[in-house]
Image (tube, grey):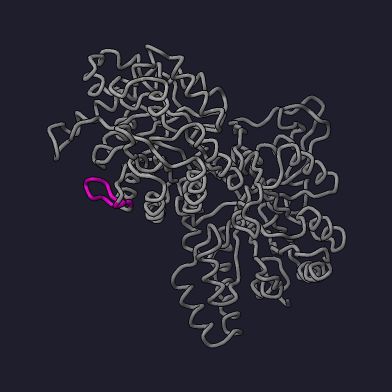
Amino acid sequence: MQDFIQAIADAHIYLFDGAMGTMLYSKGIFINKCYDELNTRNSEMVLEVHRAYVKAGAEILETNTYGANRLKLRAFGIDDELKDINARGAEIARRAAGDSVYVAGAIGPLGVRIEPYGPTALEEARHYFREQAEALLEGGVDLFILETISNIAEMEQGIAAIREICTLPVVAQMTIGTDGRTIFGDRPATIAHRLEAAGADVIGLNCSVGPDVMLDAVEELSEATARKISCQPNAGLPRDVSGRQFYMASPDYMGKYAKRLIHKGVKFLGGCCGTTPEHIKVMADAVRPLSPRRSFVIVGEKAPEVPGGVETVPMERRSNWGRKIAAGEFVTTIEITPPKGPDPDSMVESVRAIRAAGVDAVNVPDGPRAQNRMGAIAVAVLLQQRVGIEPVLHYCCRDRNLLGMHSDLLGCAALGLRNLLLITGDPPKMGPYPDATAVFDIDSIGLTNMVNLMNHGLDLGGNPFGRPTAFTIGVGVNPGHLDLDHELKRLDWKVKAGAEYAITQPVFDAAQLESFLRRIEPMHLPVVAGIWPLLSYRNAQFMNNEVPGVSVPDDVMQRMRVASEKGKEFGLREGVAIARETLERVRDRVAGVQVSAPLGRVDLALQVFEGLVAVGVSATV
């Protein structure tokens, strides 16, 4: 199973479990008992609850240690058992989790007020958090979750305590009231800024309120941070029925809100008080169509061992595209969009113009933005056979399982397709059929690893299959990512998995690209800059607001606005001029350039190359 830090970076929506206390109470454990003590007194009961959540679809189990800090255990006279209770809690959860479910070391609030609102010093609070975290770490957790904390200062001490003992990821979840604020009046935006600064890997909310209140709070939270968001609401607000507290939100209600929370940006979803395995099962069923599948491919540090008698193909012999990149020659390509129907003739004619202009290759996207278009593999073969130009085939993980991808790639090798750009793919919710099922057995990191193995004559299981494939392995990267550190980590994993070059998302800010290139210099990875000639101010607004990973600077937006106000042709000319300026500025810093043909306008893409004879493209187009 991959490290949880990779789970944070991938595209999958992960499901936490639900309430432990609710389940133990339903099994006859009185509310005035220490539930954490059951880890050592009745471990089978705790194990039974964990297993019920795994069966329901939970992918992250929280240890039964929410109240197992020294201060709370002292109230029951068992604080001397702190280490055993926490370590056993982690071990029990691990027994239920097996090899496919993560175990989160659960740490709740200390139960005291800390300075300046109470007598407990910050350093003292950090000490209490640290000793509980050390015991959970010894028990073998994959991550930590600090939850149901209402004082940001207390949460900060919890994060600091964990950071003192290890580098495991930290999920930090505050609790809010029906007004959307903590009891100290902090708004979600304030929570986001402070917890990000404190070093939380995932920032979220849990407990106290139901999913309706959390929906608005999550929206504010996601707008204030680039960190991934978690959310574990109660099953509504409790009601008093004959002296007992009942949570009234049904599993179906929680399932409906699960979809809404995901659309607001939640990546880690689960339940708190009042939720049961039934709630989690319905939430899992609701989430599944919206979520890429998990990747279980582990990225190795060493290159795969080549089977005896198998000779790998050097990059310079795989294709002309690969030869030029390997030799440090500037490569050029234009990205075209496959047709919506079965007639390829118009596309073929436009690509003939690309070849005539001297462009090295044509990029063929694979269902971009989850739109319905002709299959990328078929388009790549058509263009290679009818036009005689090398395609760079985008291949995404969204639509195929592992078996299908392996079969596809063997077929691509047999058909003579050599150049790949491996991407995770846009989720179906972006396209016209948002309820379509996404597969995502692996993400782009796992797919890179898979293709690298195939280039060494091995399938994903490490079994030899004879003559190796000869793919030139490319990956995507976004220099303008809101959380650039995460993007750089993913790129590093891709390089370790076998990536040989990268193509960027469309770049409109040359300075941003230059800064990005400086940061990745130690990777020694050739980068092909993606450039998009804008059509109009409206097109610029669309790119800036509706295309994931793309950011258009304010000065470019202003130029396009002024030009477009003069007329359509003025907007077109300004868009091409901006693209040319970007290309000229980065020409000597990148391995090549990919120019997109917006709305099929190949003529505009070719105009970007005009006058740049040194690029190797005809200056007469």
Task: Tell me: residue 37, above or below residue 492.
Answer: above
Drawn side of residue 530 relative to residue 28, left or right: right
Farthest-out residue, left: 119
Task: Tell me: residue 294, above or below residue 545.
Answer: above
Give percent across and percent down for residue 80.
Answer: 26, 13
Task: Tell me: residue 560, above or below residue 511.
Answer: below
Query: Which quadrant would the N terminus be assigned to in this image?
Result: top right
- How many numbered marks appear? 0
Drawn side of residue 554 relative to residue 357, left or right: left
Q: Residue at x 57, y 62 (%)?
A: 506
Q: Residue at x 76, y 41 (%)?
A: 404
Q: Nearer the viewer, residue 575 or 357?
A: 575
Q: Residue at x 57, y 73 (%)?
A: 539
Give percent across and percent down for residue 266.
Answer: 47, 47
Farthest-out residue, bottom: 566
Q: Nearer the viewer, residue 556 or 368?
A: 368
Query: Which quadrant would the C terminus be assigned to in this image?
Result: bottom right
| Residue 183 located within the stretch drawn in magenta | yes
Give the magenta-colored segment's residue range: 179-188
